[in-house]
Image (cartoon, rainbow, N blue to C red):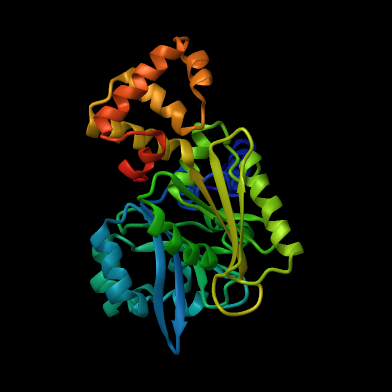
Amino acid sequence: MSAENLFTTSRIENVNRIIAELYDDSILLEKRMESFFLNLNNIVFFEKANFLFYQKQGQNYKTHSIYTINWNDEQKRRYQEEYCHMDDVLSILDSDSNVTFLTNQLFNQEVRKNSLYFQEFLLPMGLHDSIETNFSIRNRDLRGVFSIHRSNDKKNFLPDELSLVRLFQPHFCNVFKNYGRELNIGRAFHVLENYNCIGIGCFDDKLNFIGCNTTYHTYMENHGFADLSNNPISNCFRSLCRQLLRSGSITGQNIEYKMENSPLFLEVSRSHLKEGPDNDCFVCLFFDLSYVMDRTLSQISRDFSLTNREVNVLSLLLRGYSNDQISSTLFVSIPTVKKHLASIYSKMEIKSQKQILERIHFYDK
């Protein structure tokens, strides 16, 4: 493939679109990486690719995390546990300067083919030839590498393909600058993943959105907020974060807020991602009270064999409606409301509204 064929107007337009999608923080970072793999492959053919985040421990290298395309779980496990410390490109890429190279030009191929790393890992994996580029991360404990690979039955990568990949290098530096910090937050996300009523989002010390759990992301999508960073809920979180800043709060303190005309209850606290400067963040939780209420009512209906109309009456009652308001809302008479309430109390074996909460549990999963 020649340089003039590679750098056509349409391909440059594709490059710009791919770069724009990399910066789209309304999409989870892992999804952006997956999309990047697929889009780049439409411009530069490769068979396998990876984003590698690693740490240097003395003279050895250890995988922090790796995102791949066309690697299976066992291959990723073997690289991380057995071969990362043998990876012959890391000593070259482990630099504060930007480094991008073709392995077919940098290495003596005959010598490399005789290495244990090549024979045991690269050759069976079909990682015969590659383009390698590094990128910096704000977390100084981590380094980043992007690689694309071809097997030995395909043509080697060419210099013009290297030039195209090099276009993305400064953007990797920007997109992944907070990567290590996001992964620390990710541990908190993982704890709350199974709670469908609890969304967790995080903002850095400059109030930039830096991540969220699945519940947060799904809730925003379902309510038409495609931009996770800029929507009424995220903006409300930022306002609460500013209140914490103005109050001179310290780590561990929090502020709570019930959104008007919304079933969301918000809570914001300050935290440290890790020791060191510039590592403060704001952890922002929302509790979807309507979800809790709906699940709870569904369970009550099953536990006490309530009719649909009785569930409607109980729902309004738990939301603080008076008998008159229930009558008006459901378009039934007050005696009918009282009849439904009497039936509810009988089935739940209680005598008054005050005892309802003693007979139910709130379900949040």
Screen quadrant of the C terminus: top left
List the single residue furthest toward the front: 351
Q: Residue at x 50, y 77 (%)?
A: 92
Residue 80 locus on image (x, y percent): 32, 71
Residue 328 locus on image (x, y percent): 52, 14
- Count of numbered labels shown in the rendering: 0
Q: Residue at x 26, y 79 (%)?
A: 116
Question: Is 12 placed left or right of 349 in the picture?
Answer: right
Question: Is 249 placed left or right of 128 in the picture?
Answer: right
Q: Quadrant of residue 271?
A: bottom right
- Looking at the picture, tell me which residue is in the foreground, 199 or 71: 199
Answer above or below: position of 259 versus 124. above
Answer above or below: position of 150 versus 303. below
Residue 140 seen in render: yes
- Looking at the picture, tell me which residue is in the foreground, 89 or 236: 236
Residue 39 seen in render: no
List the single residue furthest toward the right: 246
- Looking at the picture, tell me which residue is in the foreground, 113 or 224: 224
Residue 34 locus on image (x, y percent): 44, 48
Q: Quadrant of residue 298?
A: top left
Q: Residue at x 52, y 78 (%)?
A: 141
Q: Quadrant of residue 275?
A: bottom right
